[in-house]
Image: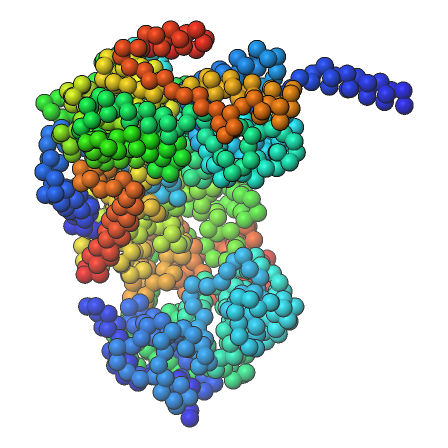
Amino acid sequence: MSKQNRAFRELGPLVALIALGVFTAILNPRFLSIYNLQTLGKQAAIFGIMAIGETFVIMSGGGSIDLSPGSMVALIGIVSTYMIVHGIPVFIAILVSLGLSILIGLWHGFFVNKLKVPAFIITLGTLTIARGMAAVITKGWPIVGLPKNFVMIAQGDVVGFPIPVIILFTVLLITHFVLEKTVYGKHLRATGGNEVAARFSGVKVEKVRYIAFVVSAFLSGLVGIIVAARLSQGQPGVGGTYELYAIASAVIGGTSLSGGEGSALGAVIGAGIISLLWNALVMLNVSTYWHNVIIGAVIVIAVTLDILRKKSLARSK
Amino acid sequence: MKRFFLVLVILLLGTVMIYAATFAVIGKSVHPYWSQVEQGVKAAGKALGVKTQFFVPAKEDINAQLQMLESFIAQGVDGIAIAPSDPTAVIPAIKKALELGIPIITLDTDTPDSGRYVYIGTDNYTAGYIAGETMKKLLNGKGKVVIGTGSLTAMNSLQRMQGFKDAIKDTEIEILDTLNDEEDGARALSMAESALNAHPDLDGFFGVYAYNGPSQALAVKNAGKVGKVKIVCFDTTPDILQYVKEGVIQATMGQKPYMMGYLSVAVLFNMSKLGVTNTLMMLPKDRIIDTGVDVVTPENLDDYLKYMEELGIPVKF
Amino acid sequence: MEYILEMKNITKEFPGVKALDKVDFEVKDGEILGLVGENGAGKSTLIKIIGGIHIPSKGEIYVGGKKVVFNSPNDAFSKGISIVHQELNLCPNLTVAENVFLGMENLGEGRNNFLKTVDMKKLEEAAQNLLNRIGAQFSPNTLVRELSTAQQQMVEICKALARNPKMILMDEPTSSLSIEEVERLMKIIKELKKQGISIVFVSHRIEEVVGICDRVIILRDGKRVGTLEKDEIEENKIIKYMVGRDVELFPKHVERKKGELILEVKNLKWQKMVKDVSFKLHRGEILGFAGLVGAGRSETMQLIFGINKLENGEMFYKGHPYNPESPYDAIKNGIALIPEDRKLQGLILQMSVKDNIVIPSLRRIAKSGFVLDEIKEREIAKEFVNKLQVRTPSIYHIANNLSGGNQQKVVLAKWLVSKSDVLIFDEPTRGIDVASKAEIHKLMEELAAQGYGVIMISSELPEILNLSDRIIVMFEGKVMVELDNSKRNITQEEIMYYASGKKQLVNP
């Protein structure tokens, strides 16, 4: 991918996002109310942060994919709130929960790198196990009675910007820098692009993948905390199928499922599109029976259009 | 030869000693609601001196239920109560059990065509109708309402909504939208927020599933519209009762899962001791036992809590 | 009619490029026709038109004197034209017989649809007949994945024969065969000619074309630039037509000084591929490794480069014991491998030339070890692109779009940037056009003269003989002999003798 090409990589999905926004705003001006934009921002933060993690994993190539984010959201949400209601200080509970997320990422990396278990399988295992553990810990009951300083993580705002949105932008800034400006980012692209050649060039392919899985698990855990704070409770059932939205967001944002290509910004734009749809379909009073049909169609159209656009770009070169 | 007889005698003795009637109850998912059912099942088992087995899949999963049902049939238990996640899919298995002489009843969710002997549960239509009546009173027969639910296909959801709609049919209450969050608490919250945005003149929310009420309550609270937007919802999880206490939720339909569990075992016990025909003669002709709902409001909350404590299932929040 | 296939005035345009420009092409009954040309000369476009994959923009095609239009590969098939592609298209999970008759399980009788039952016995008999025709030794019910590349190619030829062709076109059939296997293929081709089948032999190995062809057609820049009849076929004539000027394949040998000992390996062993290998490498020399495919040459180098872990033996690098855990270790020490399979092992194809060049050195170039320094990367990439004369529109061009020769230079550049001391070339000029080949040879000589320790594995004997100062011949994982070639006096026969496993050379 040439330099010029890369600068415009997120253009397609960005245009789609803006077009959807403008369309909705024209039909219902209340779409642009501060309160609604905050709602939208919080939702986009949830999907966006997960999609960034997913982007790291998918970029690392070799068929890597992370199916665990949705269940991780439930598990880490439960673990953190469980600790908090059992008297552990909020700060420490969060640190421990994120630590657990990192361990789960390492666990994925270990199976993929050392035991050569396909990422699909090991993360599918986590999808079931994490969801199951959340149910085991809670017996299905929501964990309630969370202190204000925890709930603030998702319900507070700074000059109108919801804290989840601020977290999203922080994560985006850091990951964008890592992917575009650091040796790790380059090695990640190389590993995904051609694992053998990367290894032959002295890239520590295993280490690169370990980090990708850890980033994804860590960010899913972070989202778990945000979601728990947003709902004011730990819910064992939350986040089902979120992994699919995370994968779809990453792909809409230009991540190639075969690895090597992808961007954090694109993933966030992809997440923005899906979140905007969730919001807009309600704002536009579309019958709820149609919601999933439309979301699915938009995902297919967005990805197809982008692939066609890239093809025509490549041809005109 | 001598030795063989000795073993045989010991085995026979053992069987007789261990043998006590065993009743199996299959619920739908890991959820507080089903924990209460389990409590009822256990209490009944203890009171009647029989063994009980309670099973729920981690998430709603008709396949897991079927496998469990078949393995209970294979074990030759003395009676089974099941809450089928899919009322048609279980029909063959239920018919097979009945052929083998194992009494089967349904609880919570019915499947009348299967030939099950009795259904014990909330009459969801009636409960929805009561919710509608409650809403009618709260809004003085005039206003705009949005419904939040987790399914547009599940029987219980459809019946509750139908009952609700029929109760407000001849009033000036208008249903603006029905929002399906596919049983995802975070999405339910997003949708409730979006609905508040889309309809600034909204007067009421009707929450069909247990988590819908708290999601709507949180959205209403955050928007500063407590009391202005009335909430009528289902179930009595601690978070719902907390919102009732705060006056954010005006009324919730408390189902009686404990009763369902207790009655299921009691009915099955009777069938195995007195025979199926004798038991059915004592029951209503339509073979439906409606456990009814408690309408819990801020006014009668204390009485309700006291009642639950007497049952041995105190709700803490 | 004398011609089996005649193509007149064929022009093929792609957006922005004219791949073929009014090319005439004709195949005579029962001849072996050579088709040569550099990469990009239009060979593959012409082959695809013959195979019905591309449709020409202009021009006519005649088969047996009748005008035809090829719209799909099946059209070409049905007119008796078969193609054996360079990349073999076999299903490794099926048997030889199943592959040969894939798509014609009915053996050409009646309709072939999914509901037809397959008579495996009949298929295997028919396949055995075809295998006999070309003298293949393996059984028709062997799984293809168990066959060597050369054997798989025979399956492809049988697959072509199964369709009763009048003409078989072989696209670069020798590119992954050993010397012995090439000889066997040549025999098969001559045998097919006897059976009355015309052969179009497409190859970049000019010595093979000279050896077997009755007539040669040469393409350059999408045009037919020359035709050589049997008695005119000569290597330098072909090269001149191909390149458009005289090219010296091997640079004049300049004496260079052998420097200090840099790498020594003793009794290396790894699985069954490397049994006992010892040698020394000095700065300032090219050490050539000759041998048949499977002699363990590449595997030996993979031990030195840390891809596989040594099971037995010792290595010393710059006087110290050396035992790399991974390529990362080898590179850190200054040992570089220019691998055999550029596209798979050497390059990350969808990355830019610049990214490929700097990737092993990123950490060193980066600010404080992890923040990329775009400016410095660009400077370095530009410097080496100029130094090695890599022909690319810009350093941001993706590596996939370069020709083989330029790709190889990019691989080499990345190791020069990473400050290596030992350069290991595995088949450095495989699949590379004639002009670039000469450039790479010149570069290798220069690098040796600058004091790099250079190791070269090659299956092209002229390359070994002309470039190496010393030659090690391997056979079945062992070093057979080490020959001094400082006078460039070793002959092809000598090497072949040792490469086939014989110990002592009596009366060469």
Please state, as top left, top right, bottom left or bottom right, where the C terminus of chain B lies in the image. Answer: top left
Quarter of the image with the N terminus of chain B is top right
Res B187 quadrant in image: top left
Question: Relative to residue B200, is residue A196 depicted above or below?
Answer: below
Q: How many numbered discs, if any?
A: 0
Residue A197 in the image, given as x and y percentages of width and height: 36, 47
Left or right of B158 in this view: B171: left
Q: Is residue A250 found left or right of B294 in the rendered image? A: left
The residue furthest right is B1
- Residue A102 appears in view: no
Left or right: B74 as drawn, with respect to A262: right
For the point 60% across and 20% down, the residue is B270
Comparing B52 with B127, the one in front is B127
Q: From what the image shows, is residue C191 above or below residue B88?
A: below
Q: Nearer the viewer, residue C422 or A50?
A: A50
Say left or right for C462 vs A37: right
Residue depicted at x 48% and y 20%:
B260
When the figure is inspected, residue B101 is found, relative to residue C348, above or below; the finding is: above
Furthest-bottom residue in this view: C1
Image coloring type: rainbow
- Residue B16, position as x, y percentages in the image: 73, 17
Q: Quadrant of residue B280?
A: top right
Residue A286: where, in percent of width, then height?
Answer: 22, 42
Residue C2 against residue A9 in the figure, above or below: below
Query: Residue visible at 45% across and 54% down?
Result: C289
Q: Is residue C294 visible?
A: yes
Residue at image location 45% in from the left, 45% down from the top:
C302
Q: Position of residue B232 (x, y in %)?
A: 27, 23
Image quadrant where residue C445 sits: bottom left
Q: Nearer the viewer, residue C41 or A208?
A: A208
